[in-house]
Amino acid sequence: MNRGGSGISWKHTTSGHDYKQPDVQASASGRGQYRHGTVRKVNVPPSYIKKRNKGHPASDACSANHPQGHSIKPVHGFNALVTQEKMAWLVSVSVRHGDHYKGIEHSNFACSIKGYASGSKRPLNLREQGQLIPLLHNFKVTPGWIWRSLTTTVHSFTKAGVFTPHKDMKERHKEAQAALLSTLLDAVIVKLGARDDIDAQGTANLLWALAKLVNNGLGLEKTPKLKESVTALLPHVKIKAELKEEKDPFIPQHIAILLRALAKLVDNGLKLEQTPKLKETAVALLPHVKTNADSKKEHFNTQSTANLLWALAKLVDSGLKLEKTPKLKEAVAALLYQVTTKAKSKQKKDLFNPQEVANLLWALAKLVDNGLKLDKMPKLKEAVAALLPHVKTKAESKSTEEKDHFKRQEVANLVWALAKQVDNGLKLDKMPKLKEA
């Protein structure tokens, strides 16, 4: 049984092809060099650039690039979106403005690729990657790029699956893929080193993207620039988390994204005890969890609640001590109340999906397994009790919809979690719902 609890969802994580990690990792570690070749002068209407997905929340990387209410023309197929003429036009814009170019057109192009992938409800497949990646050999980051353009580009390409290493990818495409990532990471490292002020949204999106790259198969040890980018970004997250000013605060969604990203990095090999900055960053974010969870306003939805509790449990399981970190215990207690309230709610918006139920019970079991006492924390027992009917209902569901059922991994994690709760003092004979589940 997998007791790692890594069943948490990262949309567009898989591609339908197996990863072939070593080639891409090795290539991405090298320098990313791009040249501006001879550019044909073309008059490409920029309408394809100005797109914004209305369905995305305000903290989405692309929505901030466009004014509120901007009209969006749907993308009519990948062939229309990715053409040699459009790429040549992007290069010409960059050449024309030189070091004064802010990178906005490039980041909007990345947004359009992400919009296509989101509309397709999957990352780019092998054919689409093979069509796009050769056109990106002149996709260059110049010194004038602003943070928003850089973070939006990294986030959008990552979410679209541009950097997902496919097993059957041609060698030259792997090299171009790795070179593009290397170029973007070079720019990230330089800007972080220059202490340019990255905004809250950009910080959250960038850490999410870096963690997603690791989660998609790029090993931190085999991709030094990726590890360097993560290490350089962590102090910026900590500084923003500790700011008392209200001019650029992390919103609740950012807090959930950041802590989940930290947990995913730990889950993929970043050692907590060997990375003090990671531990400090996590601790700096904890008061925000408590404040937002305690608020009378509903700041955390079901997904954020499940992701946050999973992230805290993963950090605890990786070495963050409950007893030595009072803020951690307070954050957990505040989230437990949210879990119980939502699990007992009759409102549709408060319904946990099967994956969230599995992740929550796994997280609660991990917390108990790492020293949180059932008899000393009534909120924990209440949260478990409130979730049990959801386990039974979903396990017995006759729905034909896949989203209403537990996957095999979730069933395994749930059985382990329930057994662990019993092992730590939850009595079967005194809790009928546990026995039924």
Image: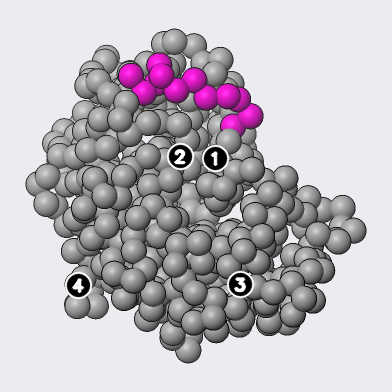
Q: Residue furthest left?
A: 194
Q: Earlier in the sequence, mark 1 or mark 4?
A: 1
Q: Amino acid at mark 1?
A: Thr
Q: Which residue is mark 4?
A: 243
Colour mapping used in the image: one colour
Query: Which element carries disc 3, helix, strand or loop?
Result: loop
Q: Amino acid at mark 3?
A: Gly
Which x, y percent locates residue 169?
51, 16
Task: Give the CA distance from mark 1 to mark 4.
Answer: 33 Å
Q: Which residue is mark 2?
A: 215
Q: Amino acid at mark 2?
A: Asn
Q: Which residue is mark 1?
A: 13
Numbered tag placed on residue 425 in the rendering: 3
Which x, y percent locates residue 430?
74, 80
Q: Residue furthest bottom?
A: 296
Task: Give the CA distance from mark 1 to mark 3.
Answer: 37 Å
Task: Give the CA distance from mark 2 to mark 4.
Answer: 29 Å
Q: Earlier in the sequence, mark 1 or mark 2?
A: 1
Task: Give the CA distance from mark 4 to mark 3.
Answer: 41 Å
Q: Earlier in the sequence, mark 4 or mark 3?
A: 4
* Residue at 34% in and 60% down: 320
Residue segment shown in magenta: 15-26
The part of the image, by quadrant, that contains residue 249 is bottom left
Q: Earlier in the sequence, mark 2 or mark 4?
A: 2
